Amino acid sequence: MNPSRAPEKGEVLKLGPPASGEVIIAVDPGSTGTAFAAGTQTLLPGAQMPAHKHLDQDEVLFVHKGQGRATLNERVIVVVPGAMLYVPRGAWHGLRNTGTGTLQIAWVSAPPGLEAFFRDLSRAGASPTAQTLQELAQRHRVEFRQAADAPAASNPPHRHRRRRRRRRATPSAAPQGRREKAGGAPPVSLAPPAGQPSRPAAGRQRPPRGRHRRRVREVYMGGRWVRVEGEGPVIAPGTQGPERRNPKPGGDDEPPAVRLSVPL
């Protein structure tokens, strides 16, 4: 690929995979005499700069557009517009475009030398061979890291797993033969013996959901205390003597002096 020159941009270089995109050399030390080189690089969706390191240059990378994932030694960093990375010489680094649009960065290399590597890489064609890349790396003192030495992601994606709820078997639900074979006690039947009424469950019973709780009171009627539901009066009106105001000698077990009635 032959480089083109745009006066308003600089020298434009086209790169093939894996770093598919283009490089623009904006500051060329060969023509400006500066002690550094600068430019921009654009990566297409899915393209990447494989992890590598420069033995003679320090770099500064500034993300201008898009989003991606950068590698700096053993760290994996998600980069967005405005992110800046300082890459000292000898540090492993790489960049991948993880978005759906182009990823554009600005780069500065000091001392110069990175612009010459980009020129030779663009002349290698759309699909350079591994031998060609190795020759370019040796010529420009660049080392590429093998895939087996790549660091793992610092924040791997979390996968949600659904937990299955185990049902706890009741003693009466297990077969009797299986329990006796395992050496356990036979199942205990919760039903009452024949001829005896079932005993109500102890404790306070909660009313069914969706129904109003009715008021329950206890009154003394027919020689025993009974439970009465409802809001109506229970004790029929009558004349009460002065002795009713005094406490009953026998306590609550003494039958009341007046007649009781329960509204139906």
Image (cartoon, rainbow, N blue to C red):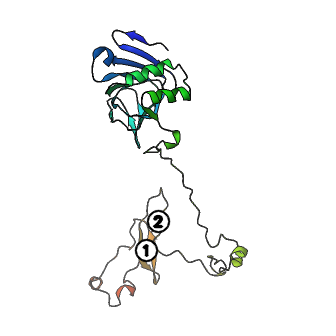
Q: Is residue 2 above or below residue 135?
A: above
Residue 213 lies, in percent from the top left, at: 43, 62
> Nearer the N terminus, badge 2 or badge 1?
2
Q: Is residue 148 left or right of residue 4?
A: right
Q: Is residue 243 left or right of residue 209?
A: left
Q: Is residue 192 above or below residue 91?
A: below
Q: Is residue 28 visible?
A: no
**Mark carried by residue 231:** none
Residue pushed farthest top?
A: 7
How far is disc 2 from disc 1 in space, using C-alphas? 28 Å
- Crowd band around label 2 with a 10 angstrom C-alpha radius: few (<14), some (14–19), many (20+): few
Residue named by callout 2? 206
Q: Is residue 245 left or right of residue 45?
A: left
Residue drawn 46% across and 17% down?
Answer: 14
Residue 203 lies, in percent from the top left, at: 46, 74
Residue pushed farthest front?
A: 139
Residue 36 lies, in percent from the top left, at: 30, 24
Residue named by callout 1? 261
Amino acid under label 2? Arg
Between residues 102 and 186, which one lies in front from this camera angle?
A: 102
Residue pushed farthest bottom?
A: 249
* Labels 2, 1: front one: 2
Q: Is residue 22 above or below residue 138?
A: above
- Crowd band around label 1 with a 10 angstrom C-alpha radius: few (<14), some (14–19), many (20+): some
Amino acid under label 1? Ser
**SS class, disc 1:** loop
Residue drawn 33% across and 34% down?
Answer: 85
Labelled pair 2, 1 in contact (Cβ < 8 Å)? no
Residue 262 in which image quadrant: bottom left
Residue 57 lies, in percent from the top left, at: 34, 31
